[in-house]
Amino acid sequence: MSKTIIPKDYQPSIGLGLSETQAAISKIKNCFANQLRGALCLARVSAPLFVDPSTGLNDDLNGVERAVSFDIKETGTTAQVVHSLAKWKRMALHEYEFQPHTGLYTDMNAIRRDESLDNLHSIYVDQWDWETVIHPEDRTVVYLKNTVNRIVDAIWRTLECIKTEYPQIHVSLSKNVSFVTTQELEDQYPSLSPKERENEYLKEHKTAFVMQIGDTLHSGQRHDGRAPDYDDWSLNGDIVFWNEVLGCAFEVSSMGIRVDAKALAAQLKKAGCEDRTRLPFHQMVANGVLPLTMGGGIGQSRLCMLLLGKAHIGEVQASIWDSDTREICQSAGIRLL
C-alpha cells in the first residue's frame, strides 16, 4: 500500500517543467559537488557498486535489511550490492595514503530492496559519500560541529546559486544550525516518537544536527538504528532541514566521526555483534592499521528534492513504484521520472 501523501495546494507544474527540472538537477549536483569538495578538501575517486561480503565492508544499516546479492560465474563467489560505502571509504583512504584533513568523495549508488516507498524513500539510493582523515585530537564534538557547519554552508550556497538561475524557485533554508542530542529530544518530548520529536524541533529551529544516534536512550529505546562498526555513536548525527512543502523534518545527511578501536569493541558488544571482530576490516580498525576518519553520505535525490521544492522523490529520480503510488501521483499531476 502506498504511503504517498499530496500536500494541500501542491502544484508540481508551477515553476519548473520536466525538462527544466532535469537541467536543474544536473546543476545542483555539479554545484554542490564543487562546494563540498572545496569545503572539506576532497578528491574525487571511483567507488564500487558491489563488494565481497567476506571482507566486512558492506554497511549493515539496522541489521535487518537484506542486501542484494548475486553469484559471479567466473569466480564462483558471491557479491553484494553495497548498502553504503561507510567502511569501504575508510579502507580506500588507507590504501590511497591520504593525509590528515584531506579526503575523498564519490557517487554512491545502492539498491535497498526492503526500503519503504513513500514521498522520501525509494529502493534506489544515490548519495555523495565522503570521508576524511583526522588526527586523534580531532575526535571531538567541536570538530564534528565545525564540519557540519561547513556542509550546511555548502548546501545553502548551492541553493543560492540555483535560485539565481531559476528565480521561480522560492525555497529558503536557514544556515544557522541548531545542535541537539537524541537524549535532549527525548527529554523535551517524552511522549512523542523519535520522528515526531524531530518534526516538533525542526518546526522551530528549521536547520538542525541531531546528534548521538545508535545507542539506547534513558527510556531504553533508540532514536534510530546505526550499525555498530562505522560511526562512533557518541560523535555522529543527521543533518535535518524543515521541509516547507511536506511540513516535516527532512534528513539529507547521516555522518559522523568513525569508531576507533575502543568504540568499535564497545559498540559491537552492545549490538551483540562481537563475531564481526574476525572480519578483515574490523581487525584493521582494532589493530590501528586504518586511519582515524570522519565521513558521511549526503542524499543526491533528497537534496534535489529539497532545493527544488518537490513533494515526491520520484520527481527527481528514476525508480520503480507500486501501482498505488503511480495512481496517486498521476491524479495530482505529479510526473514520476
Image (tube, grey):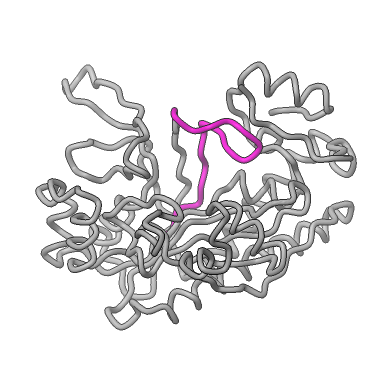
Q: Is residue 125 above or below residue 230?
A: above
Q: Which residue is drawn at 74% across and 41% down?
A: 311
Image location of residue 13, percent across then percent down:
87, 36
Image location of residue 306, percent across then percent down:
70, 51
The foreground one among 159 and 333 is 333
Q: Which residue is drawn at 42% across and 65% down?
A: 212
Q: Quadrant of the N terminus?
A: top right
Q: Residue at x 82, y 22 (%)?
A: 331
Q: Does the magenta stretch include residue 126?
A: yes
Look at the magenta stretch and give its main secondary structure.
Answer: loop
Q: Quadrant of the C terminus?
A: top right
Would residue 298 be found to the left or right of residue 325 on screen?
Answer: left
Q: Is residue 318 above or below residue 208?
A: above
Residue 312: quarter of image: top right
- State the extent of the magenta-drawn residues as a range: 113-130
Would residue 70 be found to the left or right of residue 165 on screen?
Answer: left
Image location of residue 77, percent across then percent down:
18, 25
Q: Is residue 253 magenta?
A: no
The foreground one among 334 and 193 is 193
Q: Is residue 136 above or below residue 91?
A: below
Residue 90: quarter of image: bottom left
Q: Residue at x 30, y 32 (%)?
A: 80
Q: In this view, does 81 lie above or below 144?
A: above
The foreground one among 251 and 49 is 251
Say how many tags the image has. Answer: 0
Image location of residue 235, percent across then percent down:
38, 69
